[in-house]
Amino acid sequence: MFRDREDAGRRLAAALTAYRGTTAVVLAVPRGGVPVGFEVARELGLPLDVIVVRKLGVPYYRELAAGAIGEGGARVLNEQVVRQSGLSASDLASVEATARAELDDRVRRFRRGRPPVPLRGRTALVVDDGVATGATAIAACEVARALGADRVVLAVPVASPRTVQRVRSVADDVVALEQPEWFSAVGEVYDDFAQVPDDEVAALLHRSDAAPQRGITPVPASNEEVLVPVTGVQLPGHLTVPEGAAGLVVFVHGSGSSRHSPRNRAVAHALNAAGLGTLLFDLLTEREGRERHLVFDITLLASRLAQVTTWLRQHPSYGGLPLGYFGASTGAAAALVAATDRGLGIRAVVSRGGRPDLAREHLRAVQAPTLLVVGGADHEVLALNRQAQTMIPGPTSLVVVPHATHLFEEQGALEEVARVATEWFLRHL
């Protein structure tokens, strides 16, 4: 019935046009409901948020729900189930404590410090990618009302007719595009029903924050070759910015490399998919690259990086985006030096197989959150990064990719670099 969740979200939005321009809030059920909700929120010009709920299962019969909990201490109980199951107050408190710990963990992974959208006095459009049994949908609707929503509407691409009737007992309205009589699993009605990772949930929430309903001019998309003027020369680069990007990462390549580095481009592609812009550029001209002493001139490289950053800061469309640096090898040293310039406003740094020893005298001035990623088999560089971690005063983390060498050529190694870098930038940008 649907190509993918994005297709389902756009079609669902067409059935919800009555809410366009109102004070309604789209509450997506993680994880699968978030891509659907993102499209609904974008089409209708509404804020997007997640509604994270956990059912309170009866001990020894977990499928039977005694209630549900949500953020902000929200709790709803099914008094009939509590009474008939003989749950004592201490039993209920124990179940809730376990569920609350699980809920708090999920909230941290999805929100990453992002505050919830207030619901009091507003309509909550609870969106998921589909409803089979309805247990989670019912819990989400009840929690939305407990959080202050004046009106609760469940909106889904597909649901069974029997479940729709059940949900109507807790929701003011139910919108279900398709209601097949024989229906057992949501994935049956999608051509593409790939798992939605935590990073995508966080990225979609960040991208939604840049939408017009928050009073911010949406960031336009870009995929273009650029020439960046620095002292005496112009440096070629490639700027890629997804629509509504939540931040932009400047790549700083290592010695003997360029903006065409396949490893940096692979990481950049992952960042773009997560809703972050990227700029890959050449630190040196072709002629300068043949002069060995310039390749290791960290002062020159950091100066060039600072000028490129200033050029970005003055860009009419992207100057206001939060900026981060991704540095590789010697480029990581240049990134760390440039990051000490508070005027550049660098929010985060990721170093891949970096040479922080080449920036040693500057490390104690690095305040930006810094992630050091090193291969477990890159023994000499690993030792240098462990030493650097003790010197950088800002928030710092060291990730060792097992069995990886300096270029991360081993199977799955570069994918792990991309994963942890994406998570770091989403958290700090």
Image (cartoon, rainbow, N blue to C red):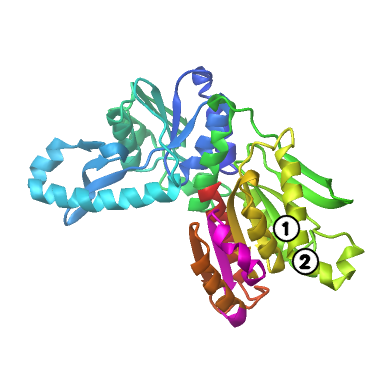
Q: Quadrant of residue 353?
A: bottom right
Q: For the residue marked with disc 2, what is the amino acid?
A: Asp
Name, please, the residue furthest toward the front: 361
Give the amino acid type for the residue marked by disc 1 in the picture. Answer: Ala
Residue at numbered disc 1:
302
Q: Specify the farthest residue to the right.
A: 287
In the image, 179 versus 384, the foreground residue is 384
Q: Position of residue 230 (x, y in %)?
A: 83, 49
Check the picture and name the quadrant holding the N terminus.
Answer: top right
* Mark identifier at residue 297: 2
Left or right of 226 in this view: 277: left
The x and y percentages for residue 143 are 30, 34
Residue 1 visible to an observer of this rendering: no
Q: Which secondary structure lies at badge 1? A: helix
Apparent side of residue 100 relative to residue 324 in the rendered image (left or right):
left
The part of the chain drawn in magenta is: 356-380
Residue at x-position 64% and y-position 31%: 218
Q: Say few, some or many: other residues with alpha carbon within 10 Å of mark 1 (under 14 / 14 to 19 / 20 or more).
A: many
- Is residue 329 something one can see in this rendering? yes
Q: Is residue 18 magenta?
A: no
Q: Residue at x 7, y 47 (%)?
A: 88
Classify mark 2: helix, strand or loop: loop
Left-right relation of 269 to 237: left
384 above or below 277? below
